[in-house]
């Protein structure tokens, strides 16, 4: 039978003395979404050094939490968990930090959050040549670019 397990979410942007409470709450809310099983994941403490949030997962939920975390790490988890992962990285970029979710028992990294080390994708536009096949019936309208109707 599986026992309760502890995990650590280590944020390398703050110490417990410098972490603003509201920012910690933002991180914890996103972490709760990533892990799922909200009734079975419990806050235990914050350890010194870089901010290390220790949390305990009830034994019944451990396999589900591990499976969900693994799927988020692979990038194919539930959409809410993937959004939360991206949000944590965005917060970390704003805070100039990184983070890792680690198994307290084995010390193995479960999910890495690159934060400031990850380059944010930006799109400036897409241009592509193309052709329209049809007969122009009318060009007009009140918009800047007008409208084209084809039959």
Image (cartoon, helix red, strand yellow):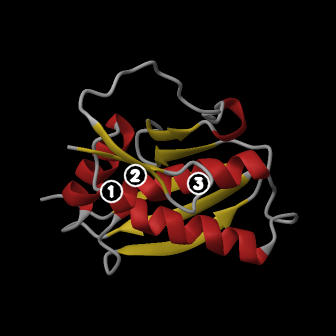
Residue drawn 65% across the image and 50% down it? 90
In this rendering, does residue 130 appear at all? yes
Expressed as whole percent of the image width and height from the top left, the position of residue 39 reads 32, 81
**The quadrant where residue 83 appears:** bottom left
Q: What element carries label 3?
A: helix
Horizontal arrangement in the rendering, residue 151 relative to residue 112 (left or right): left
Between disc 3 and disc 1, the foreground one is 1
**The quadrant where residue 113 appears:** top right
Q: Distance between the residues labelled 3 and 1?
A: 14 Å
Q: CB atoms at circles 2 and 3 under 8 Å apart? A: no
Q: Is mark 2 on a helix, strand or loop?
A: helix
Task: State which quarter of the image contains the N terminus.
Answer: bottom left
Q: Dot 1, crowdedness within 10 Å: few (<14), some or many (≥20)?
A: few
Check disc 3 and report the residue beneath it.
88
Q: How far apart are marks 2 and 3 (CA)?
A: 10 Å
Q: Dot 3, crowdedness within 10 Å: few (<14), some or many (≥20)?
A: many
Horizontal arrangement in the rendering, residue 19 relative to residue 117 (left or right): right
Horizontal arrangement in the rendering, residue 29 relative to residue 57 (left or right): right
Q: CB atoms at circles 2 and 1 under 8 Å apart? A: yes
Q: Which mark is drawn over residue 79?
A: 1
Dot 2 or dot 3: first in sequence order is 2
Placement of 26 over or under 80, stated as above or below: below
Check disc 2 and report the residue beneath it.
82
Expressed as whole percent of the image width and height from the top left, the position of residue 15 reads 81, 57
């Amino acid at each position: 039978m599986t026992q309760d397990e502890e995990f650590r979410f280590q944020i390398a942007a703050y110490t417990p003395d410098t972490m603003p409470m509201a920012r910690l709450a933002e991180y914890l809310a996103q972490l709760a979404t990533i892990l799922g099983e909200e009734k079975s994941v419990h806050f235990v403490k914050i350890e010194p050094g870089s901010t290390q949030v220790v949390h305990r997962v009830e034994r019944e939920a451990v396999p589900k939490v591990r499976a969900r975390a693994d799927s988020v790490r692979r990038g194919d988890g539930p959409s809410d968990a993937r959004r939360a992962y991206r949000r944590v990285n965005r917060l970390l970029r704003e805070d100039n930090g990184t983070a890792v979710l680690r198994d307290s028992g084995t010390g193995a990294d479960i999910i890495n959050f690159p934060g400031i080390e990850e380059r944010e994708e930006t799109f400036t536009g897409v241009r592509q040549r193309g052709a329209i096949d049809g007969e122009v019936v009318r060009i007009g309208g009140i918009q800047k670019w007008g409208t084209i109707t084809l039959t």
